[in-house]
Image (cartoon, rainbow, N blue to C red):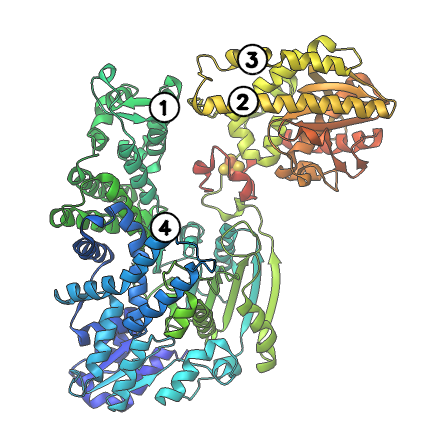
Amino acid sequence: MQTFLKKLVDHIWETHADNLGDLCIVTPNRRAGLFIRKYITDKIRKPTWAPRILSIEDFINKISGLTICDHLTLLFEFYTVYRTLEKEKADEPDAFFSWAPALLRDFDDIDNALAEPGKLYAFLEDIRYIDTWNPDGRELTDFQKNYLSFIKKLKTYHRELKEHLTGKNLAWQGLSSRLAAQKLSAEKHDIPWRHVVFAGFNALSQAEETIIGTLLKKQTATYIPDTDPFYIDDPDHEAGRFIRKYHKLFDPKTMEAGEDGFHDDKKNIRILGVAKNVNQARLAGNLLQNEPGLSTDENTAVVLANENLLIPMLNTLPANIGSLNVTMGYPLTKTNMFSFFDALFRLQLRAILPGRDKNNQFAFYHKDLLALLSHSNSSLLWDLKKGDEKTTAMLKKLNASNQSFITFDELAGMSEEAHIFKDAFSFMNTNWQNDPQKAFSDMIRLTEKFDRLYREKAGKQGGDIIQTPFFVDFESLYYFGKIFRQVLNLLNGYPFLGSVRTLYKLFRQTTSETSLSFTGEPLEGLQIMGMLETRTLDFDHVILLSANENILPRPKSSYSFIPYEVRKSFGLRLYLDQDAIYAYHFYRLLQRAKNIYLIYNTETQDVGSSEKSRFITQLQYELPIYNPRVHIHEEIVSLPPPLDTGDHAIIIRKTPDILQRLDEISEKGFSPSALSTYINCPLQFYLDRLARIDEAEEVEETLEARTIGSVAHGVLEKLFQPHIGQVLRKKHISAMQEQLEATLNNEFSKEYKGGDTTRGKNLLLYHLTLRYLENILKAEAKAIERAAANNETITILALEKELQATITLHEGSDKEKTVRLKGLADRIDRKGRVIRVIDYKTGRIGPYELSFKEWNTPFSKSDKAKNFQLLFYAYMYSRMNDLETDIEPGILSLRSPAKGLQTMSHPGGEGILKKDDIQAFEEELKSLLVELLDPEVPFAQTDDIGNCQYCLFSKMCRRF
Ligand code: SF4
């Protein structure tokens, strides 16, 4: 393919071959320079001077002669200026770091737009005065006065910071661009090259536009955009909005020949919708493995419009990928390393000195310890091989100890290898709170240690680190190390940074502004890229992920002190410009590609919307008319379970031991919750019920939902117990209301041994439970009234009733197997002629949760689990009692008792189950049990990743 950069080099060769050394080529990013250099080298036959190739930022900074401050230094310099101006009125660093980054972005925008600061800030002040004006003459509040005074000072902050930095030969990028534009516009200023080629630019800032325009006027520059008539010739096409303007302004050299890819080329475009983000990555992996004609070399780009898909994408790449290059930014805050350092900061910040009983040692809050120790990096620190085992064992002991605060020595004592633990986790053993130097030195040492450990781990796995699941974390270490070192250096020059709390804020602020920049070898191997990194590059095959609305284009981004009307009046970038910028990236990426796969997420819960991008819809309407040889095919893809993805799938085959264990359960009885677990995920059932990997007991610091649930169940059982077999009357309910508090106190002391319910959160929860139960009793009284109005009565038949049934399965034509079922129904009563099987629930029930249209739905969808449970109870009760009567299972929600008994809408009707309905359920239940007990059907992972969200084993399965 004749790519843009190849054509550019051909053009340069034709026009400047004799004096390349006097030429400067400027591109939107440094990456393009690598290709240009290679293509020029391919042409050179004799020794010659190479041209200078620069990114636009490097070019501008050469002209301005200024060095760009990194984010941290800029913040610190700004604080120095701000403190000098505000003196004792200055905000503390904590507060300053909250608003300063937004203001620095605004300074950058103002300078990039070459807006006149005096006029802009005056306009801004006027607007803010009007906003806060009270037409009735009321005085402004203190808050409004402070705000206006702050707005008034912005121009001083901007001016003083500019003076302060340029005095040190420093600048932010926008300021450097403004000063470069001013320098070039001055008649006498010359550039160090005879000619400059600006290639591949789309949306220029006003400063860049002035720089290029000035050099073009001086006839020392050429401007060569990368375009296609499809979007340039249509005056309404947003992808061409900026370049159409430059066509008028600059009279560019467009290298016309062959530049009509949308019209001339045969293109195959597949638009593929798939549920969930992670499945987009799996689908891309499947395409790379199976799609005929799709190469897995440098001619193919996998473009991630949402950078967060990088890790799922790396984890789902098929084995046939040879070399690979990742070129994109990835948010530092999304890395595992970030969550580790963040957990470490929080652990240290919340550590307390508990007193003499702990030998005056600092003690850590148990939840912070859990967060840090359960982190995969803690396992790595402890033991490369058995780290998981060791941390799990310690966490069990930690939970069992039921202590809220634990010292380092106490913690080490929970390990059989206390000395190894103490050595590996020595960084926890000193308190950082007033020693930032110590804090950051410790973290620098940790980055170095992790670097060693990751290399060792990759070496043991015998692979290239880029192919390992921890590649991103390994890469992030460089950035964390750099940030920590920088802070350590700055600590010497900026004495106001005394506390670790301030530095923690700074850590979060800086990491949120930093992206890991992967810059591999873009000349070779499959290319995984971000959208911005595709600028000026062309590929035969493009797989674009997250082609969703709200990602392509992205909605309005960061906070600004400058409102829309001021931005518009002074030519600052608007979020509407973003649409045109993204449209250009999208169409430019496709203009020379032959095979295009546009994948979008059809689900709403994840980032972005569930709709495909408007750019795709536009393409579908316009392109086939423009070029009938384009073939566009659209489909919604349903992926097979991840079993097929090979490497990471976990399947447990049914060994004789497992089958024996299943037989034991069949004899003891399957409970509805066990079968619900199987429906949610067969592997989870295996791990939870057969391998017995239980959820560790947690320290119950406040009354948790399950305690509240069992207390409420206990209270209701005690109150209704004396009335079993009786018709319920309102006077019974009145008596229950009187006994309520005493019964509740009793149940609490039984369920929550040693817990204090007289203060804090526990006291609130106590009152909440009391309120729930009061409301339940009120609702019960109303239900009795309503029943009486219909000439009906309510009779309690049983409470906490153990239910049992057996079911006979047919295995083949002659084999039968009997399986026991069991469960505990909260209450069974008779209302009129109907038997009601009632389950109490502490949570709210959505209407969606209790309705389904096919009998197999509760057996296949985990979000219909409540129906399954109700049907299961109703089935057992009817089997135990040989019932011919109708039966009505339902839920009484403690949170919304006024709704009364909430029943199901099912394929047989509303609420009441008839004999046929029970039979239909039985058939489905039999199929489920046959599958569960089938020796040939293994326990596999669910293919619905949403089911993994709250699963204890999600880390093991690498599902979240
Ligand atoms: S994480 Fe997902 S796949 Fe793994 S056991 Fe849990 S539910 Fe199943």
Instruction: Name the residue beneath numbered marker 2.
Output: 767
| Circles 1 and 3: CB atoms closer than 8 Å | no
Which residue sits at x=42%, y=53%?
308
Taking the image as drawn, is residue 523 in sight? no
Q: Which residue is mark 4?
A: 143
Q: Which mark is residue 18?
A: none
- Mark 1–mark 2 Cα distance, whole angstroms, equals 37 Å
Q: Position of residue 577 (x, y in %)?
A: 43, 71
Of all residues shown, which one is farthest toward the front?
137
User: Which one is in front, 204 or 458?
Assistant: 204
**Marks 4 and 2, the one that precedes in the sequence:** 4
- Residue type at tag 3: Glu
Task: Kindly indicate the quadrant of the structure image that contains residue 614.
Answer: bottom right
Q: CA distance from mark 1 to mark 3?
A: 32 Å
Mark 4 or mark 2, whichever is nearer to me: 4
- 788 sits to left or right of 426: right
> SS for tag 3?
helix
Which mark is nearer the camera, 3 or 4?
A: 4
Quadrant location, the C terminus: top left
Q: How far apart, in angstroms, are the residues tagged by discs 2 and 3?
A: 14 Å
- Does label 1 or label 3 sit earlier along the sequence? 1
Whole-number angstrom distance, CA of label 4 to CA of label 1: 53 Å
